[in-house]
Amino acid sequence: MHPYYGFSYPYQMFRAPDPSDVTQFKHSADQFMAPTLEMYHLLTQLSHSNDLALKIKEAASKSEHQKVEDYIKSAGVKSSFTLTYSPEGLILMLKPQDPGACFGIRLSICW
């Protein structure tokens, strides 16, 4: 019995992973590289291009979500991503293309 919830549950529902098996870890790290480079290129363009930064900020201020996505894609982001923005800034979450990879990259940047 769990002392707080009043019912029993298994503490370990699954077998512990083999600590010497790094296959998944290495695969996720490998899949992490392409989106990381895409994020780097996006940040480089944002920091050097007043035009791109202005287009993204203006489109976001008008809630033109598709335009913001298109501008981000035009900066070289090919990975799937989710995008949210507010008056404070932009949040971009890049996800792995391969469902077998396990990672996420979150970019939060203030206007």
Image (cartoon, helix red, strand yellow):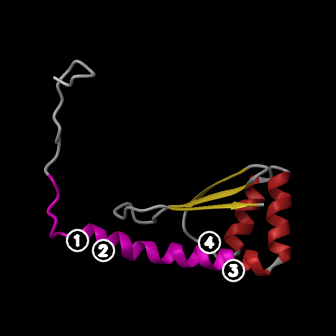
Q: Which residue is labeled 4 in the image?
A: 77
Give the alpha-carbon distance from disc 3 to disc 1, as whole Å. Answer: 33 Å
User: Could you tell me which quadrant the N terminus lies in?
Assistant: top left
Q: Which residue is mark 2?
A: 26
Q: Are marks 2 and 4 in contact (CB under 8 Å)?
A: no
Q: Viewed as shown, does residue 83 lie left or right of 47?
A: left
**Going from the N terminus, do you reach mark 3 or mark 4 first?**
3
The C terminus lies in which quarter of the figure? bottom right
Residue type beneath disc 4: Val
Going by the numbered disc 2, the residue's amino acid type is Lys
Question: Tag 3, which secondary structure?
Answer: helix
Q: Residue at x 85, y 67 (%)?
A: 54
Q: Which residue appears at 80% of the width and 79% of the height?
A: 49
Q: Which callout, 4 or 1, points to the residue nearer the camera?
A: 1
**Cα–Cα span, label 2 and label 1:** 6 Å
**Amino acid under label 1?**
Val
Label 3 sits on what residue type? Thr
CA gap, disc 3 and disc 4? 12 Å
CB atoms of marks 2 and 1 within 8 Å: yes
Circle 2: is it few (<14), some (14-19), or many (20+) Cα within 10 Å? few
| Residue 111 vertical position relative to residue 15 in the rendered view, above or below | below
Residue bearing mark 3: 44
> Which tag, 2 or 4, sits closer to the chain's start?
2
User: Mark 1 sits on what residue?
Assistant: 22
Badge 1: residue crowd in 10 Å (few <14, some 14–19, many ≥20): few
**CA gap, disc 3 and disc 2:** 27 Å
Q: How far across and how far down the image is residue 53, in percent? A: 80, 70
**Image vertical order of residue 23 relative to residue 102, above or below:** below
Which structural element holds mark 2? helix
What stretch of residues is rendered in magenta? Answer: 16-44
